[in-house]
Image: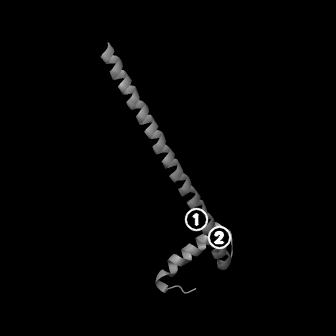
Amino acid sequence: MAITVRGLEAHQKMTKRLKYLTKKSTLSGALIEGGYAAIRYHDLYIEEQSRAESLETELKRLKGTVDTLISSLQILQEYNHGES
C-alpha cells in the first residue's frame, strides 16, 4: 500500500482507529474486518433507505386521508350552518 508522506499522519491515525474499532492488532486484519463492516453497514443503509421511502409514502397517503377528512368535516359544518 503506497502512502504519501503528506498523508502519513492522517493514515496513521486512521489505521490506529481502525485497529481499535475492529479489535485487530494487525493492519491487514483490521483492513479486512473494516471492509466486511463497511459492506454490512452499506447493506443496512440500503435497507433503512428503503424502509424510510416506504414510511414516507405511507405518511403521504395518511396525510391525504386526513386532509380529505378535514375538508369533508368543513363542508359538513358549512352545510349545517346553512340550515340553521
- Which mark identifies residue 84? none
How many dots with numbers? 2
Does residue 47 lie above or below 80 as drawn? below
Q: Which residue is mark 2?
A: 36
Give x and y (percent) for residue 76.
Answer: 38, 23
Name the amino acid type tagged 2. Tyr
The 10 Å Cα crowd at callout 1, few under 14, some 14 to 19, many 20 or more, is: few
Picture quarter with the N terminus: bottom right
Does residue 48 lie above or below 1 as drawn? above
Name the amino acid type tagged 1. His
Residue visible at 66% across and 79% down in the picture: 28
Q: Dot 1 lies on which element?
A: helix
- Which mark identifies residue 42? 1
Which callout, 2 or 1, points at the residue further toward the start of the chain? 2
- Which mark is in front, 2 or 1? 1
Does residue 72 lie above or below 19 as drawn? above
Camera-nearest residue between 36 and 5: 36
Give x and y (percent) for residue 59.
Answer: 48, 44
Residues at marks 2 and 1, CA–CA distance in whole angstroms = 10 Å
What is the quadrant of residue 25 in the picture?
bottom right
Camera-nearest residue between 49 and 24: 49
The 10 Å Cα crowd at callout 2, few under 14, some 14 to 19, many 20 or more, is: few
What is the quadrant of residue 35 in the picture?
bottom right
> Which residue is at the far top?
84
Q: Left of 74 or right of it: where is 60?
A: right
Does residue 4 lie above or below 18 as drawn? below
